[in-house]
Structure formats: C-alpha cells, structure tokens
Image (cartoon, rainbow, N blue to C red):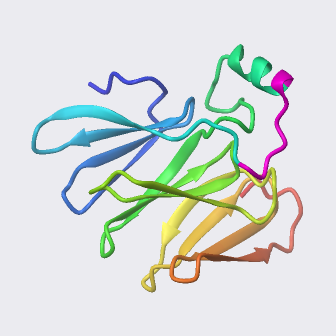
Amino acid sequence: PISVDGRRYDLTTDEQDNVWVSQPGGNSMAHVDAKAGKVDRLLLDPSAPKDFEITDEDREISANLRLTPNTATPLEKGPRRSTTDRQTNTVWVCEFFADRLAKIDPRTRKVTEYPLPHRYSQPYGVTVDKNHNVWITMLNSDRVARFDPATEKFTEFQLPTRGTEI
C-alpha cells in the first residue's frame, strides 16, 4: 500500500518500471520501487518560489490550512497528471497550485521546476511528443503550452474559446 501523505491521483512509470504517483493534496510524489517492493516519497520543495511575493501573514495562513486536491495556496505544489519520457527517462509533473512544470530525474531524484508564463494558469495535464517536447494543458488560462527541454522555453497557444477548463 502507498502509505505516504496525500491522495493518489495518477501514475507513470520510469524506464526501470518504478511507479511515480501524483499526490495533489500535498507536496510530494509517491515512488514505488518495483524491484524492492518499497514505497517512499519525493518531497517537492514547499518553499515559496523566488518570483512570488509572500508575506509572513501568507506563511502563517498557509501553515494552518488543510490541503485538499483542489484547494491550497500558491505555496503548495499539488502535483498531478504526470508522465514519463521513457527515451530520456524523465518524469514530468504539473504543479497545479504553484503554476510550475516539474522535471524529475528518477536516477538522482533531482527536481527542476520551470515557472509557467502566466500566474494562476493551473497546469493540469502533461504529455510528451516524439521530439521530447512537453505539452501542458492549463485549467485556468484557456491555453495549451509547449515546453522545449533543450531550450527550457515555453510557447503558449491561445484557444479560440473562453472558459474551456481544459
């Protein structure tokens, strides 16, 4: 059983067939070691991103809130809808509350975060194409974004309809 905090939402597997489970009610990904049969977690840094203006009052309020998969402050990550580029052995995760795309190296467990071009976009789903570009749907911005890992740049595509909650 996955006994670490947070709800289980979706999963992906890396090239070693280990399972990564998004837990949107918190700041972690569960990791299931397929060979050892052990479960642990990878904490996604809950500290405030440098581009967020956070006050002491914000920190106090955040510390006293109970997280759910759909409600949290921007200090939380809320990972969801992860995928793996098995050719590069990279796990990609949407950080719903933090408006970031996270890249996890399964071997080193290093997490690199990329801020989305627009705050409050709420990245929801991610997939990878044959050229290793990462495509992100954003629940709150009526856009789809493409992230090029080679250049670490986003390109956004505005959808023709408002309120799509894609």
Tell me where residue 2 appears, x and y as whole percent: 31, 27
The answer to whether residue 105 is left or right of residue 163 is left
The answer to whether residue 54 is left or right of residue 50 is right
User: Measured along the vertical axis of the image, is residue 67 above or below residue 142?
Assistant: above
- Residue 1 quadrant: top left
Tell me the chief SS of the magenta region: loop
Membership of 52 in magenta stretch: yes
User: Measured along the vertical axis of the image, is residue 162 above or below residue 145?
Assistant: above
* Image quarter in which the C terminus is found: bottom right
- Residue 63 quadrant: top right
- Outermost residue, bottom direction? 131
Tell me where residue 8 appears, x and y as whole percent: 44, 33
Q: Give the range drawn in magenta.
A: 50-57
Tell me where residue 119 appears, x and y as whole percent: 81, 54
- Outermost residue, right direction? 162
- Outermost residue, left direction? 35
User: Measured along the vertical axis of the image, is residue 56 above or below residue 50?
Assistant: above
Q: Residue at x 51, y 41 (%)?
A: 44
Looking at the picture, tell me which residue is in the foreground, 147 or 112: 112
- Residue 15 quadrant: bottom left
Membership of 93 in magenta stretch: no
Tell how many labels. 0
Tell me where residue 37 appears, x and y as whole percent: 14, 35
